[in-house]
Amino acid sequence: MSYIEKKYKENIWQTFGTLVKLEENLTNLLTKKSLKEVDEVAKLCAEFNKKINQILKKYYPEIKNMDDKLKIKSTLKFYYDLIDKLTDFIRNVENFQQLDDEYYNALIKFIQQKDMLISGKYKQICANELTAFYDKKSRANLEKIIAEKFEKQSREFFTVGPLEEEIKKIAKIAGAGEVIIKRADATNFSSISDKARSIIQVGFKSDQAKTMGIIEELKKYIESK
């Protein structure tokens, strides 16, 4: 393991360590079951977002050891879903101005089950994804399937397991409002390359610089795989 990989691995787990306190603060807010706390929940959500972005953008791409990659990726997936759930929570409060106790309880339970989810559900999902990308036999089978689809002129988007959803979450964390992944169609996109087989459409409420930032985050994530 190189010095930089070792250092970045330490930085990743230190960053994850800082999120534990945020989880405690979040649980305390949710326990109050009060709509008045939505602004504080939003602040914590933004902080989770910031920390996870830091890991994805700066540290994770340098991790090469597969065991470390699996542990980190599994933990990241928990936080992707947590941020997603908090975003829905904030949106529902804004739209409905009321939530029943079960909604709060479900969020609290999700946080409390963090370790179990990471070591179980998320680890299995991430192991499958990493195997598909790094195992030679699996990669060869994947490439064969893709080649066959291309030969048949099939232009449907092809994805492995939950990777499509993960790409969407990365884009949303980076600031996208809506993310759509679909087949490439030259009739809808005149400037599209003939070699393109899929398109990631990003909806946003900002300027072009924001869009380029989202695209850059997606590029870094895909390259890190």
Image (spheres, helix red, strand yellow):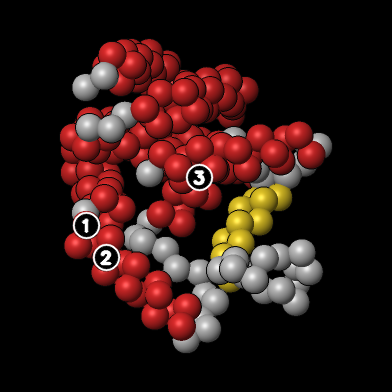
Residue 70 visible to the viewer: yes
Q: Is 144 or 107 nearer to us in this picture?
A: 144
| Mark earlier in primary sequence (2, 3) | 2
Residue 31 spot, x, y in % from top left: 41, 25
Count up the numbered dots.
Answer: 3
- The three-letter amino acid code for the residue at tag 3 is Lys
Alpha-carbon distance for marks 1 and 2?
A: 6 Å
Badge 2, how many Cα within 10 Å: few under 14, some, many 20+?
Answer: some
Q: Is 179 or 66 nearer to us in this picture?
A: 66
- The three-letter amino acid code for the residue at tag 2 is Ala
Residue 182 spot, x, y in % from top left: 58, 67
Residue under numbered circle 2? 140
Could you tell me which secondary element the residue under label 2 belongs to?
Answer: helix
Alpha-carbon distance for marks 2 and 3?
A: 27 Å
Q: Is 148 or 71 nearer to us in this picture?
A: 148
- The three-letter amino acid code for the residue at tag 1 is Lys
Q: Are marks 2 and 3 in contact (CB under 8 Å)?
A: no
Residue under numbered circle 3? 169
Residue under numbered circle 1? 136
Q: Are marks 1 and 2 in contact (CB under 8 Å)?
A: yes
Residue 132 spot, x, y in % from top left: 28, 57
